[in-house]
Image (spheres, rainbow, N blue to C red):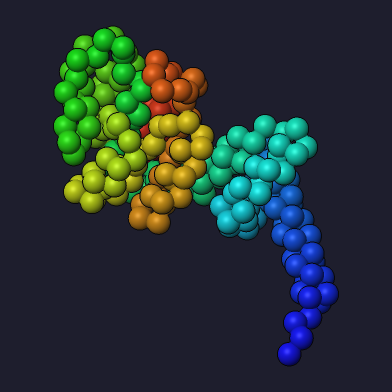
Amino acid sequence: MQIPYEILGKVFIILTIVTITGIAIALLLGAYSFKRKRILFPNFILFMLYLFYGPAKWICRRFSIRDTIVDEILVELRNAIMLDKFRSTKGLKMVFLPQCLRHPECKARCDPVEGYQCTKCGKCDIGTIYKAADEYGFRVFVIPGGSFVKKILRLYKPQSCIGVACYPELSESMQGAAAYMPVQGVCLLKDGCFNTEADVEEIIRKMEETSV
């Protein structure tokens, strides 16, 4: 039987065009929702951008658009969609902070399960976040990597959480956690491997949401 290469080629081209068009529509809707704070077709946008994450970033770069907009859209849409559930959820609540927020002279011990044990020395913003977390009933974990999040979630089974990270890591982590609990994400103001900065006011505001 002769393989219909011509037909297969046409089908492939049509599927490629449809996919690229779908991604472009999702990006436009996402950008509109992100800027106007008015969510349009959120499930479609999340589905398309998570499924075609790489191609979506390629399209942005192709048109000289910063590709982090894809992650920003995913994080902010997820925040908006899950906000009401996050506000109303009771039980154990957590905040996950990246270890790169620690002061260069930090002497905190790293527990093999719970991550760095902050001593609240006052040299970085982590102590301020701990203080607010005590007030609003959150438990804070300063983690060296994503594997710690999985261990902590399995061990403590929280009902909701706030994640702090750079946009690419945040969008990926929120996708996984959202299947189990309401989540909120706050992006770092300055990212990198060390000496990063967090939007402390925004993190505290997210915690305040649960007391509304």
Task: Name which residue lies at 27% across and 40% down.
Answer: 148
Q: In this view, does 159 lie above or below 115?
A: below
Residue 169 coordinates in the image, percent (x, y)? 46, 38
Residue 124 coordinates in the image, percent (x, y)? 32, 13
Looking at this view, is 15 or 97 the one in front?
15
Residue furthest out toward the front: 2
Q: Is residue 175 above or below residue 66?
A: below
Residue 150 coordinates in the image, percent (x, y)? 29, 47
Q: In which quarter of the image is residue 145?
A: top left
Looking at this view, is 127 or 207 the one in front?
127
Quarter of the C terminus within the rendering:
top left
Q: Is residue 92 left or right of residue 84?
A: left
Q: In which quarter of the image is residue 61?
A: top right
Q: In this view, does 166 lie to the left or right of 52?
A: left
Q: Is residue 113 left or right of residue 169?
A: left
Camera sees residue 172? yes
Task: Name which residue lies at 36% across and 23% down.
Answer: 100
Task: Name which residue lies at 65% across and 42% down.
Answer: 57
Camera sees residue 80? no
Residue 127 coordinates in the image, percent (x, y)? 27, 18
Report the number of numbered marks: 0
Q: In this view, does 10 lie to the left or right of 77?
A: right
Q: Is residue 206 above or below residue 91?
A: above
Quarter of the N terminus within the rendering:
bottom right
Task: Name which residue lies at 21% across and 11% down.
Answer: 121
